[in-house]
């Protein structure tokens, strides 16, 4: 589906009916991949309208010369939400950099947000300022790194659980059509500029704590964004569940069942909160 704004058309996908849930992907990830990860968590669970957004430069939403950093990217996301569900209450989900942008949405629309979930969230956009553990391979099954393609070897190089099961999961991902692929050059221009790869305001400087249900899931071995920085957010979220998974890097290897369980619990809490 397309959300036609004044100076950009945003692509998004919708699944299900009910209360709106806005889902923002990780950096360079497209809406379809985000849906492929998240939709199994909603099997046999009605009542949620899942809206997967491609931010500018992601998937089928083009980049633009006037979008020079995360401020403009966030403005587009906010305008898209206002267009798709004008004035409606909604919940938020963000993965990695998507969690940072989700907190930017919360900063501007806190009166409309009923819940927030974040998985491997970027807390500090500047790499040098992050508290991260070194890359540590926790599990490497014999032979799993043999006979890999160059692309697979590069991807598995940052994985902390190198199992045949996880390799099979990677190989099961479908090839993206050309029109679905993110604009890597556009995104890289932003990513390589520390001033562009952050909002000009503090997304975590909320006027008051967010008292609705929240979920923060981190990986103990996540060498990309870490887990310790996320702990600093807890004062903002007095109803937050905070989880640190062992045997988990930034890709949350083999943790789908646990993530699904925690999301399911928080979904029930959000629904109960709205009925009160």
Image (cartoon, grey):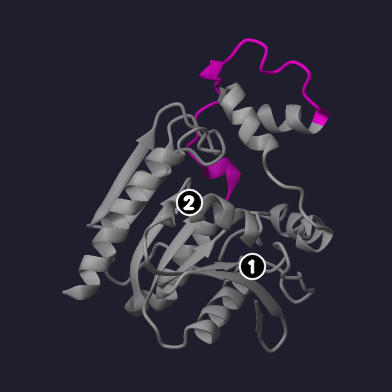
- Residue 99 is situated, as x and y percent measured from the top left of the image, at 49, 57
Query: Where residue 221 is drawn, which disc sits there?
Result: none
- Residue 32 is situated, as x and y percent measured from the top left of the image, at 64, 59
Question: Residue 158 sits in which quadrant?
Answer: top right
* Front of the two marks 2 and 1: 2
Q: Going by the picture, which residue comes out furthest to the front?
A: 44
* Drawn side of residue 255 relative to residue 10, left or right: left
* Drawn side of residue 261 relative to residue 225, left or right: left
Question: Residue 31 sits in which quadrant?
Answer: bottom right
Residue positioned 50% across, 29% down in the render: 133
Residue positioned 67% across, 12% down in the render: 143
Q: Nearer the N terminus, badge 2 or badge 1?
A: 2
- Secondary element under disc 2, as helix, strand or loop, is helix
Residue positioned 64% across, 66% down in the render: 54
Q: Is residue 166 above or below residue 174?
A: above
Residue 248 visible within the image? yes
Q: CA distance from mark 2 to mark 1?
A: 22 Å
Q: Which residue is mark 1?
A: 55
Q: Which residue is mark 2?
A: 40
Q: Residues within 10 Å of mark 2 (few under 14, many from 20)?
A: few
Q: Specify the segment rendered in magenta.
A: 125-150
- Residue 229 is situated, as x and y percent measured from the top left of the image, at 42, 44
Q: Is residue 211 above or below residue 259?
A: below
- Residue 145 is situated, as x and y percent measured from the top left of the image, at 70, 18
Q: Residues within 10 Å of mark 1 (few under 14, many from 20)?
A: many
Q: Is residue 266 magenta?
A: no
Say which quadrant the C terminus sits in: bottom left
Q: Is residue 144 magenta?
A: yes
User: Taken as a whole, is the magenta stretch helix, strand or loop?
Assistant: loop
């Amino acid at each position: 589906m397309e959300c036609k704004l004044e100076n950009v058309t945003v692509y998004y996908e919708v699944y299900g009916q009910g209360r709106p849930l806005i889902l923002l992907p990780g950096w360079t990830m497209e809406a379809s991949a985000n849906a492929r990860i998240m939709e199994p968590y909603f099997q046999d669970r009605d009542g949620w309208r899942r809206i997967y957004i491609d931010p500018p430069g992601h998937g089928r939403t083009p980049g633009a010369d006037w979008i020079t950093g995360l401020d403009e990217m966030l403005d587009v996301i906010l305008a898209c939400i206002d267009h798709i569900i004008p004035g409606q209450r909604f919940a938020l989900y963000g993965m990695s950099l998507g969690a940072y942008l989700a907190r930017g949405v919360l900063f501007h629309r806190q009166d409309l947000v009923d819940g927030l979930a974040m998985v491997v969230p970027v807390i500090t956009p500047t790499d040098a300022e992050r508290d991260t553990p070194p890359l540590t391979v926790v599990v490497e099954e014999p032979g799993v790194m043999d006979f890999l393609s160059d692309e697979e070897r590069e991807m598995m190089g940052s994985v902390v659980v190198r199992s045949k099961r996880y390799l099979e999961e990677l190989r099961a991902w479908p090839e993206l059509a050309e029109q679905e692929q993110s604009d890597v050059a556009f995104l890289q221009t932003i990513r390589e500029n520390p001033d562009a790869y952050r909002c000009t305001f503090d997304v975590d400087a909320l006027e008051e704590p967010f008292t609705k249900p929240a979920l923060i899931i981190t990986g103990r071995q996540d060498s990309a964004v870490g887990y310790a920085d996320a702990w600093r957010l807890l004062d903002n979220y007095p109803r937050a569940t905070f989880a640190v998974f062992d045997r988990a890097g930034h890709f949350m290897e083999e943790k789908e069942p646990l993530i699904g369980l925690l999301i399911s619990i928080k979904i029930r809490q959000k629904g109960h909160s709205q009925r009160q």
